[in-house]
Amino acid sequence: MLTHPAEPMYFDRVSEMLRIIGSKTRPKLLTMHFHTRAGASISEQYIFKGSEDLRIDESVMQAFIRLNRVMGSQQLHAGHYRQFAQSELAVYNVVPTAAYGGMIQVVARAPSLFTLYSQHCAQHTPGDTAASTQGKPQPVGLQQIFADHAKQALAKAGLSLTLPPSKWPQAVAEKVYNSLRNTVPSNLLHTRLMRSAASSAHLLIKTQRLVQSIGMASAAGYVLGLGDRHLDNLLVDLNSAQLVHIDFNVCYDFGGVSQIPEQVPYRMTPVLAYMCGSPHDSLGKTPFAMSRGFARAFASTLQFARMDRDVLANAVVGRSRFRPFMEWSWIEEQRVCEPPSNDPTLTVNLPLPSSLSDIYTLEEDPKSVSTQEYIERTGLCPPHAFWPPQDVPMNLSFTEVPFGWRLAHGAVDRVHARLQFGALSSASQSERVRKQTVSLWEAATSTSRLSRMFAGWASWI
């Protein structure tokens, strides 16, 4: 998605008019004009934000760019990966201008999954309104839709309608999820892709590209612990058949310590799963014979990331240790249990979220296995791995280390844990990646996990 990467662009001017986007932080949308050496004029839209530390987004974009370079260089020498020569992770320009702001390039002609869902609802709502006749998406209240289905399930179960979702029985949570899932056709995304194709052959090519893009983006998101993947943060470029991730404020596994912890390694909800099939299907029969494409794209991206793990973990993520992101410094230390005063060298542990206690696939205590093994088997980060090991810089006690530095050090350790193979042969590594691809798919598509996600995440779409 980088605009004209092969030739330099020279800045001309900024448009006199700008538009204020009506969101919580009220960012500004403006148009910047450039020209090339050949004299061609180019216009790009940028969003200026003044209340977020865009260095987080920049670090994720740099990680994506690094992975694209590694995969591009290796594809020329490995025949097994030549089929991915036309695929890459979607990236765009992120320019931090201060600790609390910067500008982000607008990804043009790429509607979000929420926009596609809203348009579907507008077209299938009984009684055509003026807005639906004009093709404009109707406002869809995901929270209200969730609440309506939840009230019915709670009433049938004889439970209080005010009972919070974290205290619902697992059977009730899954019943609400299945009820919501039946309201949205699984082929929603494929239908839109089919409308954008010129022929059946063109549709096949687009489907293959989109499945590969989903697989690569899912693997990259898993490696970086990317969270907050709700419908507005996933864009689909129907022309190039690419999945585009935006807004990376919640990454490096911090979605697992939110008020309602995220419980999946990456987003693979019914609409996306319909496109990709299942890695369990060795023959690739369901649907569109695309399951093998997703599995190969996911496994290949994961293997390339492990080949380049030192650069990804240390150069890209590790730089936050020298200047921690502002959001990390704002997190209150009262949310965690500090070590006893008589032993300040103990590793600090986050409290175990109660909503996760019934879905862990490990029978052992999380502390009894390594972080790497726990992540590989569950797709989640163990609570005790949100903190660095006992060594601290400058011979300071653990409680004297700056809070942001501790979070940054823990983020680097978790990325390393996902990319560490140890002393294994190439054949053993490939088999391990294949098994991990299947286990992570199971975790991402698990009904017990998806039914416990935040309602605004819309896990049923």
Image (spheres, grey):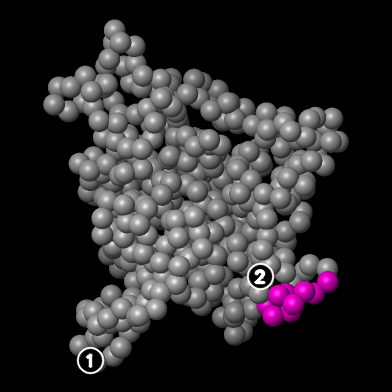
The label nearer to you, 2 versus 1, is 2
Numbered-mark total: 2
Quick one: which residue is furthest to the top in this view?
Answer: 342
| Left or right of residue 166, residue 241 in this image | left
Measured Cα–Cα span from mark 2 to mark 1: 41 Å
Give percent across and percent down for residue 12: 24, 82
Query: Which numbered marker is on residue 38?
Result: 1
Query: Dot 2: what SS?
Result: loop
Residue nearer the viewer, 257 or 436: 257
The location of residue 452, given as percent across then percent down, is 63, 38
Which residue in the protein does label 2 denote? 137
Tell me if mark 2 has few (under 14), some (14-19) or many (20+) residues whose alpha carbon lies within 10 angstroms of its own.
Answer: some
Magenta range is 127-135
Where 97 sits versus 197, above or below? Answer: above
Return the mark for residue 154. Answer: none
Query: Residue flagged by tag 1: what amino acid is it?
Result: Ala
Amino acid bearing label 2:
Pro
Residue positioned 28% across, 58% down in the render:
96
Q: Which residue occupies the extreme bottom position in the image? A: 39
| Image coords of residue 413 (percent x, y) | 31, 36
**Mark 2 or mark 1, earlier in chain:** 1
Query: Can residue 225 be seen in this snapshot?
Result: yes
Is 435 magenta? The answer is: no
- Image quadrant in which the N terminus is located: bottom left
Secondary structure under badge 1? Answer: loop
